[in-house]
Image (spheres, rainbow, N blue to C red):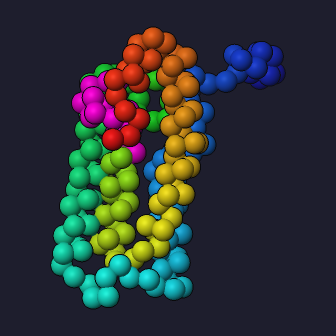
Amino acid sequence: MDATNILPENHRRRDTAGVVAAPPLLFGGALVVGFSLRAIHPIRIASVTGDVLRVAGGALIVAGVAVSIAVVLAFARAGTHVSPYRETTRFVSTGPYRYTRNPDYVGQTLLYAGIAMVANTWWPLFLLPIVLLAVDRGVVRREERYLEAKFGQEYRDYTARVPRWL
């Protein structure tokens, strides 16, 4: 018999935030939908593909990747997992977490917007508010409840001094 079937419900749940999906999947899924819509009905940001649009988009991509790398390094230094599907063993408030409680999602937003700009299409940008709402409600709020339950006053003090976004 599987031991998880005889454990009480509260012992069967994993020690995670219980997010609806990993944010890269939410952003990536919206990009797929956006590029599919572009294939059906293209709506360009600029009527003529310009170097300025590509350079600006490229800069957003670089910035987004840099922020995400800083997040991974902060988690590695703290010795805890960055994945929302793994237990958080240490509370991270260093590196980019000094400025925002969600730097990785800020970085992913920059990357997403940069990709749309380089591709010269509005569709992913039209979908971005939906993605951000899904990340906020299905990921961020759940992570916040999890971290507050796990780290208590330390996390509450952190939320009092560091904004959720920028």
Whether residue 101 can be seen here:
yes
Quadrant housing the N terminus: top right
Q: Residue at x 58, y 42 (%)?
A: 138
* Depicted 114 relative to depicted 88: above or below: below
Q: What's the residue at 43%, 18% (across, down)?
A: 155
Residue 17 sits in quarter:
top right
Q: Quadrant of residue 154?
A: top left
Which of the image's four quarters has the C terminus? top left
Coordinates of residue 94 in the picture (x, y in percent)? 27, 25
Q: Residue at x 31, y 64 (%)?
A: 114
Residue 105 rendering spot, x and y as whole percentages: 40, 45
Residue interval drawn in magenta: 89-105
Single out the residue that lies furthest toward the top.
153
- Residue 72 seen from this side: no
Q: Position of residue 150 (x, y in %)?
A: 51, 16
In the picture as drawn, the residue positioned furthest to the bottom comes out as: 48
Residue 137 is left or right of residue 3, and the answer is left
Task: Return the x and y of residue 22 as percentages of the image width and height.
Answer: 51, 44
Q: Is residue 162 magenta?
A: no
Q: Residue at the location (34% across, 23% down)?
A: 161
- The image quadrant of residue 20 is top right
